[in-house]
Amino acid sequence: WSHLFSFHLWALWLTSFGMWGTGPVMQMNAAQISRSTNYGVYDSRTLTLYIAIMSVGTAIGRISMGYFDMKLTAWNRAGKTKILTTIALPVAPLMFAVAYFLFGVVPGKALLLPFLLGSFSNGIAWSIGIIASRMMYAKDIGKHYSFMRTSAAVASIALNRFLFGGMYDAEGRKRGEFPSCNAPSCVRKQMFILMGINLLSACVAVLVHWRFSRFTRARLAEEMAPPSQLQSEQDVVEAPYAEHTAEGNSLQS
């Protein structure tokens, strides 16, 4: 429970809010994004393609992150590098930021690129989130991971229902097209807001990696310190206690 008041856990939560919480907005509103960007033109075949691309991209992202973690761990054990897998924490929110920027500016015929980039980011996000919680917490990994998962639940309500849905419906009523909204302006503002959220998450992720790397290096330095140095440090600490004990014995005699 003490970790609930720690910086690292809440920083991870905020990172997860961006990289886990904004992905479902893209997935659940693919039809609205496609229709609005294409000025009301709806093509079920194109939407099916986007859904298939999102599934494939997510799978590729997960596999890529797993392979990266495996190789980096092997290099660390071989002494070839000291880089931690948490260095990949900012990758997913940065890629999401680029994807949502593209959603806001590209024409309807070019939506395949941001859908592919966003789905790839989604796979990386879920993989690195699990890996980071496993690396940073040696005990109660499941509890820490479950706490991080609450960010996705909060984001699904705040970003999907109130941000995207609320702004989409408001623009549709303004244009007299409710419950539809058939213009890029119906989704553009939401895309830029989601981009900003992910940029913030990326900055926090960089801070998390930096602090955790510094902590890890300090612990490794302690473990690799020679026994003579550790003994000398212990002697320095115990010296005042020994002098105090000797003075007490002298007084008793």
Image: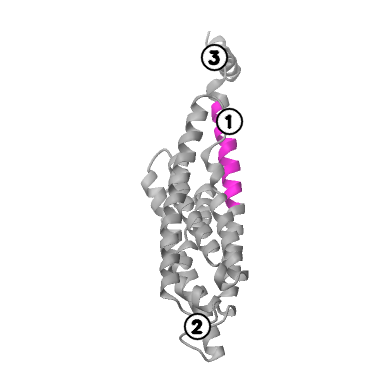
Residue in the foreground of this view, choosing between 241 and 224: 224
Please check the rendered image and state whether residue 216 is part of the magenta-colored stretch, yes or no. Answer: yes
Residue at 46%, 55% in the rendered image: 57
Q: Secondary structure at mark 3?
A: helix
Picture colour scheme: one colour
**Percent x, y of residue 52:** 41, 62
Q: Is residue 190 left or right of residue 151?
A: right
Q: Amino acid at mark 1?
A: Ala
Q: Is residue 83 left or right of residue 147?
A: right
**Percent x, y of residue 4:** 46, 51
What residue is disc 3 on?
227
Q: Amino acid at mark 3?
A: Pro
Q: Earlier in the sequence, mark 1 or mark 3?
A: 1
Q: Is residue 29 at least partly visible in the picture?
A: no
Q: Secondary structure at mark 1?
A: helix
Spatial CA span between label 1 and label 3: 16 Å
Magenta extent = 204-220
**Percent x, y of residue 65:** 47, 45
Q: Secondary structure at mark 2?
A: helix
Labelled disc at residue 218: 1
Residue in the foreground of this view, choosing between 192 and 16: 192
Q: Nearer the viewer, mark 2 or mark 1?
A: 2
Spatial CA span between label 2 and label 1: 52 Å
Labelled disc at residue 169: 2
Residue in the foreground of this view, choosing between 29 and 77: 29
What secondary structure is the magenta-colored segment mainly? Answer: helix
Q: Residues within 10 Å of mark 3 (few under 14, many from 20)?
A: few
